[in-house]
Amino acid sequence: MKKFAMLLAVVMVAVFSAGVIVAGNAPDTVTIKDVQKSRTAVAFPHKAHAERIKNCAECHHKDAAGKEQKCFNCHKAEKKGEAVAFKDAMHTKCQGCHKKDATKKAPTKCDGCHKK
């Protein structure tokens, strides 16, 4: 039992450290353009999210660690094949996470992300 607990602790430290290293390489801000051009672009604080979430696969769910690609590479402007449309993917993932925010500081309305 002690060996199992020690192994579990080592694995948890390795996973946490990998998340911090990857988060450390994350760009500070990513500009997400509105593909439909009906709203302003979103200045997404990528590094802050990466440090908070510590699991790139939470958003980059199809990519191998260290090989994350832009969301738009899979989520095109409109539905194509099985990938969810870009706007739908962003709103579902971002708003869904923000609505769970216990501090109630994360924006959930359009103007919270799409600044005028």
Image (cartoon, rainbow, N blue to C red):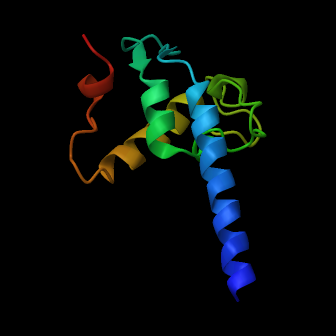
Query: Which of the two residues, 103 or 11, is positioned nearer the viewer here?
Result: 11
The answer to whether residue 92 is seen in the rendering is no
Query: Which of the two residues, 63 or 52, is positioned nearer the viewer here?
Result: 52
Residue 91: % across, % down: 44, 37
Left or right, residue 88 beside residue 60: left
> From the viewer's perspective, is residue 108 above or below residue 100?
above
Left or right, residue 41 beside residue 104: right
Residue 20: % across, % down: 57, 39
> From the viewer's perspective, is residue 22 above or below residue 4?
above
Query: Which of the two residues, 43 or 5, is positioned nearer the viewer here?
Result: 5
Quarter assignment of residue 3: bottom right
Left or right, residue 13 beside residue 73: left
> From the viewer's perspective, is residue 54 above or below residue 23?
below
View extreme (left): residue: 104
View extreme (bottom): residue: 1
Residue shown at the point (62%, 45%) measured from the top left: 17
Which quarter shows the N terminus?
bottom right
Left or right, residue 71 beside residue 111: right
Which quarter shows the C terminus?
top left
Residue shown at the point (34%, 44%) measured from the top left: 98
The answer to whether residue 48 is seen in the rendering is yes
> From the viewer's perspective, is residue 86 above or below residue 29?
below
Residue 41: % across, % down: 42, 12
Quarter assignment of residue 86: top right
Residue shown at the point (47%, 16%) measured from the top left: 29
